[in-house]
């Protein structure tokens, strides 16, 4: 089975391919707030075997106690479980260290009121700032296709909707339908375990049906869905095949201010950069209409959008509506399948929605962070996260602490997916941290087979980079061994990969393949040096990140052309304290720092070991104004003779 991941990276410490999770603590069993787990002998033995991912839609009423017992029996002694135990031991050590830090802070007599002082002076002013930046209306929408991969197959094979079925194979499952989820079968679970769950829990009455994945088919259906959604928001973003981020505010502004305008005309207007003089002057919605009227129209519009997707494509989708995308993303999971959930924009409505949630429901809080929050501070819900905001600020790095603070009040920048000041072609390069493709397969050790699989993965990634017009500079290889150990290797280039076929600077896909293969060689060589046994691999992945913006590239090219056509500038030796060093073939004057003579100034590149001398055609000393030709060192010698 192969499973690709074209993902939007978040600050999530969970691993997408983790099947299960041992959560061990020294004093008591760790139980997330979203899960009602009963104590059994089996779960006690393994310190409560938990599913790594938060409960998927359709898994609310499953017999989790029985499912965990089966999973423990079938895989409790596997290499994966052994690795999970080791990982949790490391996590427990980190939790203990953080608890000791916190205890040390509390025992300091001079800082007994540090929590209230930190809240009053640092945290609460920032919270008020965030609250004043909230949108007055809920028009941010997240569309989430329901069990997308298997639903695509149900279009051609309707009987799959009524039996336990999944996309994948015995080694790994990509997604499962809602019938299979009732038996605990879900994505990122080995297929043989899914089969065992269905067989045992149904008492042999049902079996799990496997469907081979067809990613070209999924991409085609995703493109069809996107074409419909773009009628309502031409600037929508789809960071995966089955999820879309939309802002329907512009559509509503046109529709509600011009209630006789047809949908086709509104779509055409949204796609037109020039203003339409035939339209009425558009006031902001919250000034022109009551909030209740606006939000009723928002929900009706979203319902019609989902129905249109279902009627034309044949696929159902769920949606969340809120004043920002963080809340809309959470809400999109509330009424699955084929439903929608609305979160009002007022502070009270937001807090009523977000405070009871388990921390794991927040996009970006993964398994390890969830466990850490609970283990150190006893935090289970978002309300707990807010109440312990001082501890969070003290224990975590600023970036993590600020993210958790925003999550605790349900705040995110509503323009995160909509940067109107940035050119559209550059928008995704700004907000996307990385794009990756992975494949899971039966463990193999043949070098030729590994290289062939890696080449296929890399070429598939190149196609995605080309379609999204992204130019990465960093390439990362991910290798998961048969022992479930994960190896990573990365390399960063000075120049970005450009896979635009119309560009004169276009890179060859083989360039990226060669880099990926070299990283795999490095990982294998290092593994053998450590005497870790055979290099047997069960997953390969390639990730590209650190995207270069197109306008930056164009600016650099234009600047180069402009400089090449201009005569050498005359530099005032005392005008700037900066050192100016330029290429020899540009015929420009090179000046050193105005406060230092060339005889006392070193050239870092000249001092590098075995570095060849630079041929600078012209050099001016800011101290005496004398100029000379030759290399930097030669000029220093000549200057000493002149003075």
Image (spheres, rainbow, N blue to C red):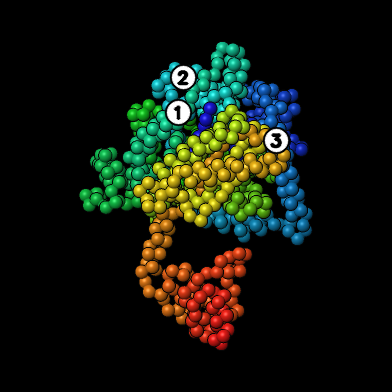
Crowding near pointer 1: few (<14 within 10 Å), some, many (20+)?
Answer: some
Crowding near pointer 2: few (<14 within 10 Å), some, many (20+)?
Answer: many
**Element type where label 1 sits in the image:** loop
Is 525 or 111 nearer to us in this picture?
A: 525
Residue that badge 2 annotates: 160
Comes first in the chain, label 1 or label 3: 1
Please say whether residue 322 is visible from this viewpoint. Answer: no
Q: Which mark is residue 543?
A: none
Q: Nearer the viewer, mark 2 or mark 3?
A: 3
- Is residue 316 shown left or right of residue 486? left
- Is residue 225 shown left or right of residue 268? right
Q: Quadrant of the C terminus?
A: bottom right
- Where residue 57 sits in the image (x, y, percent)? 52, 29
Residue that badge 3 annotates: 533
Q: Residue at x 53, y 45 (%)?
A: 515
Residue that badge 1 annotates: 214
Is 479 or 448 nearer to us in this picture?
A: 448
């Amino acid at each position: 089975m192969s499973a690709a991941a074209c993902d939007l990276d978040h600050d999530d410490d969970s691993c997408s391919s983790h099947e299960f999770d041992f959560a061990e603590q020294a004093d008591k069993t760790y139980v997330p707030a979203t899960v009602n787990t009963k104590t059994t002998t089996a779960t006690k033995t393994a310190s409560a075997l938990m599913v790594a991912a938060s409960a998927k839609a359709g898994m609310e009423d499953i017999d989790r106690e029985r499912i965990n017992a089966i999973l423990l029996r079938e895989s409790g002694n596997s290499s994966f479980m052994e690795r999970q135990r080791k990982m949790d031991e490391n996590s427990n050590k980190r939790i203990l260290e953080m608890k000791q830090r916190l205890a040390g802070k509390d025992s300091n007599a001079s800082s007994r009121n540090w929590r209230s002082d930190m809240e009053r002076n640092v945290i609460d002013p920032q919270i008020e700032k965030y609250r004043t930046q909230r949108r007055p209306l809920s028009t941010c929408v997240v569309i989430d296709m329901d069990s997308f991969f298997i639903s695509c197959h149900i279009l051609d094979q309707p009987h799959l909707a009524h039996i336990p079925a999944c996309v994948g194979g015995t080694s790994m499952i990509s997604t499962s339908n809602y019938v299979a989820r009732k038996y605990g079968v879900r994505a990122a679970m080995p297929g043989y375990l899914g089969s065992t769950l269905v067989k045992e829990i149904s008492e042999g009455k049902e079996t799990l049906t496997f469907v081979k994945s067809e990613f070209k088919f999924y991409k085609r259906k995703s493109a069809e869905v996107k074409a419909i959604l773009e009628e309502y928001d031409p600037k929508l973003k789809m960071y995966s095949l089955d999820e879309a981020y939309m802002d329907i505010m512009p559509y509503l502004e046109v529709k509600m201010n011009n209630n006789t305008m047809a949908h086709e005309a509104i779509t055409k207007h949204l796609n037109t950069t020039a203003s339409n003089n035939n339209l009425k002057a558009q006031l902001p919605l919250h000034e022109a209409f009551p909030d209740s009227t606006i939000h009723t129209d928002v929900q009706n519009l979203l319902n019609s959008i989902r129905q249109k997707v279902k009627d034309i494509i044949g696929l159902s989708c769920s949606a969340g509506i809120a004043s920002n995308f963080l809340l809309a993303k959470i809400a999109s999971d509330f009424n699955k399948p084929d439903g929608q959930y609305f979160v009002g924009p007022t502070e009270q409505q937001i807090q009523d929605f977000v405070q009871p949630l388990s921390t794991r429901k927040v996009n970006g809080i993964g398994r390890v962070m969830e466990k850490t929050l609970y283990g150190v501070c006893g935090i289970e819900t978002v309300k707990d996260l807010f109440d312990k905001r001082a501890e969070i600020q003290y224990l975590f790095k600023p970036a993590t602490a600020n993210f958790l603070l925003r999550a605790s009040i349900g705040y995110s920048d509503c323009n995160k997916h909509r940067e109107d000041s940035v050119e559209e072609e550059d928008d995704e390069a700004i907000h996307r941290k990385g794009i990756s493709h992975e494949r899971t397969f039966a463990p193999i050790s043949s070098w030729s087979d590994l290289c062939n699989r890696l080449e296929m993965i890399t070429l598939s990634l190149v196609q995605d980079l080309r379609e999204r017009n992204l130019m990465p500079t960093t390439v990362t290889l991910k290798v998961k061994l048969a022992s479930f150990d994960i190896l990573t290797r990365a390399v960063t280039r000075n120049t970005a990969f450009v896979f635009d076929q119309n560009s004169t600077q276009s890179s060859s896909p083989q360039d990226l393949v060669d880099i990926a293969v070299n990283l795999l060689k490095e990982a294998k060589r290092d593994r053998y040096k450590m005497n870790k046994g055979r290099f047997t691999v069960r997953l390969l992945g390639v990730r590209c990140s650190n995207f270069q913006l197109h306008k930056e590239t164009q600016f650099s090219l234009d600047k180069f052309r402009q400089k090449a056509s201009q005569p050498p500038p005359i530099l005032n030796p005392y005008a700037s304290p900066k050192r100016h060093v330029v290429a020899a073939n540009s015929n420009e004057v090179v000046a050193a720092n105005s406060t230092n003579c060339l005889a006392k100034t070193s050239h870092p590149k000249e001092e590098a070991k075995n570095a060849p001398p630079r041929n600078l055609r012209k050099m001016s000393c800011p101290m005496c104004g004398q100029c000379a030709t030759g290399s930097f060192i030669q000029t220093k010698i000549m200057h000493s003779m002149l003075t």
